[in-house]
Image (spheres, rainbow, N blue to C red):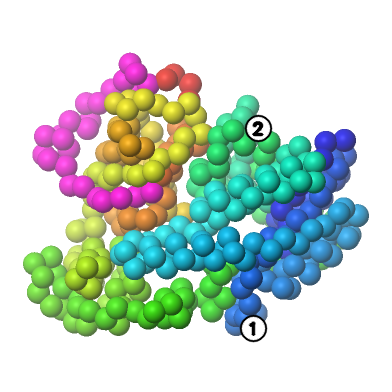
Amino acid sequence: MPRVLCALSGGVDSSVAAWLLKSQGMDVVGVFMRNGISGGPAGGKTCCSASDARDAARVADKLGIPFYSMDYAKEFGELIDHFVAEYRRGRTPSPCVLCNQDLKFGHLFEFAAAVSADSVATGHYARLEDGRLHRARDSAKDQSYFLFGIERQFLPKVLFPLGDLSKEEVRQLAREAGLLTAEKPESMEICFVPSGDYRDLLRQGGGLSPGRFVDREGRELGRHEGFEGYTIGQRRGLPALGHPAYVLEIRPEEGEVVLGRREELQQREMLVERCRWLCPEPDPGTRMQISVQIRAHHTPSKALLEVQESGCALVKFDRAQEAAAPGQAAVFYISDQVLGGGWIGRMRKPSNASAAGLSHVRTRSARTRSTP
């Protein structure tokens, strides 16, 4: 029987993933990844807590599989440090993407080798077809956006048992299997922010940086308690200006949060940095028509992708997008296949000639591979 290392978070999704693998006759080993974070509000919906560890262990016992609880507090600490540093740079981090990239599909493969497992499985909603990553069948639960950072060579050794199921189907399977997690609420918050307010981390690690709200011309519109508490597109917590105001830009060096009207959030171009590819890496200069998702709940938008040097790509949207926050992940798709992705850098406003030319771009250049 092939041996599979299944990440158990103590939630219903990973529980059913392990149950499905066991039902298929696989030799399943469960592992819980401890983040070293404690505390949080009563009834909070975080993951990786002590109670989650107990639930994961009880599921493993129910299934009759070996179970390990591994201490990744140091690695999570590095992730937290990056999270805080990004906000201090005026960026909006994507910790769940980095967690999947560096922890779940980094260290898990090391542990899989230690227990002689052939593959790694998780409860993510995504699909693999012929070694290519695709969206889940249930578009409402699809998590492929968070998985673009997996190393390409690992894909043949990854299993996503829930990729063809809906959330309700997963819960029903959990009920039928008698799993104690069947009715457990979803984990909605960042696992290392038990209070639910990420600014608490910033306050504990040196405090916030008070400064000014300003308009594009630098005129003061009010005062804030810390630019780190704001992100591009935010509307709440802003001074009354007589019209709806939004965060347009964050200037960490000046401690300024730039406000304006919603239409000022519209952008046609952006630079994506540190790109990773789950298809054969395209050469610099390659151009391709794709869809780009710029945050977890964003509807992907059609765009022209121009691959550049130094691991960057220029994205030119067919239609202007709003609130693309530097530091967030931008993920590239053709249909429902994930080609890769990267991290949003500076936003760009194209020249009139560039914008006008977008509608006349060929779907693919001669240099673009026909099958990613």
In the image, residue 327 lies at what x, y percent?
Answer: 37, 56
Mark 2 belongs to which amino acid? Pro
When the figure is inspected, residue 187 is found, relative to residue 195, above or below; the finding is above
Residue 353 percent coordinates (x, y)? 11, 34
Q: Indicate the quadrant where residue 40 lies.
A: bottom right
* Residue 255 relative to residue 38: left or right: left
Q: Position of residue 367 (x, y in %)?
A: 34, 18
* Residue shown at 22% from the left, 79% from the top: 211
Q: Which stretch is magenta?
A: 343-368
The structure residue drawn at horizontal position 38% and vertical position 48%, both measured from the top left corner, is 343
Determine if the magenta segment contains residue 43: no
Q: Is residue 241 visible?
A: no
Q: State the SS at label 2.
A: helix
Label 2, on which residue? 156
Dot 1, how many residues are within 10 Å of its Cα: few (below 14), some (14-19), or many (20+)?
Answer: few
Distance (Cα) linking label 1 and label 2: 40 Å
Q: Which mark is residue 9?
A: none
Q: Residue at the spot x=83%, y=36% of the render?
A: 2
Label count reads 2
340 above or below 262?
above
Residue marked by disc 1: 42
Q: Is residue 62 left or right of residue 5?
A: right
Q: On the image, which quarter does residue 268 sit in?
A: top left
